[in-house]
Image (cartoon, helix red, strand yellow):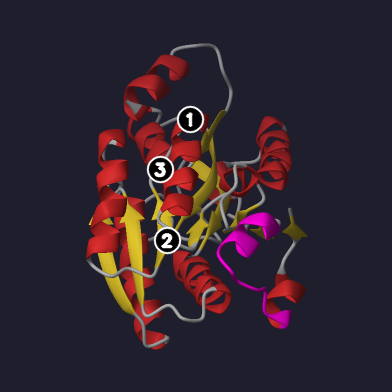
Amino acid sequence: RYPQLAEELARLPVDVLVVRGTQAALGAKSVARELPIVALGVNDPVETGLVASLERPGGNVTGIAFLIKDLETRRVDALRALAPKTRRIAGLMNTGNPAIAHAWKIVEEAARGFKLETLLVDVRKRSQIEPAFDTVRARDGDAIIVQLGSLGTAQRQSVVELAARYRLPAIYPSRQYVDAGGLVSYGVDAQQLFYRAGVFVDRLAKGAKPAELAMEPPPKFELVINRKTLRSLDLVIPPDLLLRSNEIV
């Protein structure tokens, strides 16, 4: 629905569109070709065709982007450090999202570098979430990386509770999962992301052209760990990971 929603907004008297995520940005760009777009939290925007280059986007899109290889490698490393007995990492991934499908390829590459096996469990519907955990357990998954796209509070809570029930260490893309009881998250600090978006909107409102406004990396990444969940899984935080963490909840 992203193109349809962006088209509805573009028909209104607005000067700038602000979008979050790769799919939203691509959807907006496909219909709002003249309207400046500030895209937040998009990954590999050159590879996805969102912009021509990070330094000179060349179209009507600018904003904040990150390179997915660095992000996914650090997620695998953090999960491996917290759960050192892990031999096979399972990905609960919604590969219907092109950005997440690409992320899984990077996860596989990173896991090979750490001499870990991988298992992909494709989850595109909410009804598939619980059976996915059965699959992970049946196929000897030791830990999971969760990327299911946009989920509501109830669905996030369900994922966290299933991970606890199956005693699977899990790393998530945002701290909302950790606040709900998930083990660990590594991702962009959403609050800082939107603060920085205001700067882009201000520049565009003052006449800057998105084609010439370089994309920036996120102002801050955060590693958040839930101590209670850690203890329930009989895990400990390695000293080096403790030093890298932003918050223990």
Q: Amino acid at mark 1?
A: Ala
Q: Residue at x 54, y 12 (%)?
A: 13
Q: Determine which residue is flagged by label 2.
A: 145
Asked if the residue under mark 3 is in contact with the one under mark 2, i.e. CB atoms within 8 Å, the reply is no
Please give the count of numbered marks on the rendered protein.
3
Q: From mark 2 to mark 1, how far is it between C-alphas? A: 19 Å
Q: Please determine whether, in this image, residue 61 is positioned above or below residue 67.
A: above
Checking the image for residue 18, the label placed there is none
Checking the image for residue 149, the label placed there is 3
Q: Please determine whether, in this image, residue 43 is positioned above or below residue 8.
A: below
Disc with the residue nearer the chain's start (2 vs 1) = 2
Residue 187 located within the stretch drawn in magenta: no
Q: Is residue 80 left or right of residue 120?
A: right
Q: Residues within 10 Å of mark 3 (few under 14, many from 20)?
A: some
Q: Residue at x 69, y 59 (%)?
A: 227
Question: Which of the 4 image quadrants contains residue 204?
Answer: top right
Asked if the residue under mark 1 is in contact with the one under mark 2, i.e. CB atoms within 8 Å, the reply is no
Q: Residue at x 46, y 64 (%)?
A: 68
Q: From mark 1 to mark 3, how far is it between C-alphas? A: 14 Å
Q: Amino acid at mark 3?
A: Gly
From which residue to which does the magenta span run? 226-239
Task: Please state the horizontal and vertical placement of residue 218, each as a whole percent of the image.
Answer: 64, 56
Checking the image for residue 154, the label placed there is 1
Quadrant for the N terminus, please: top left
Q: Residues within 10 Å of mark 1 (few under 14, many from 20)?
A: few
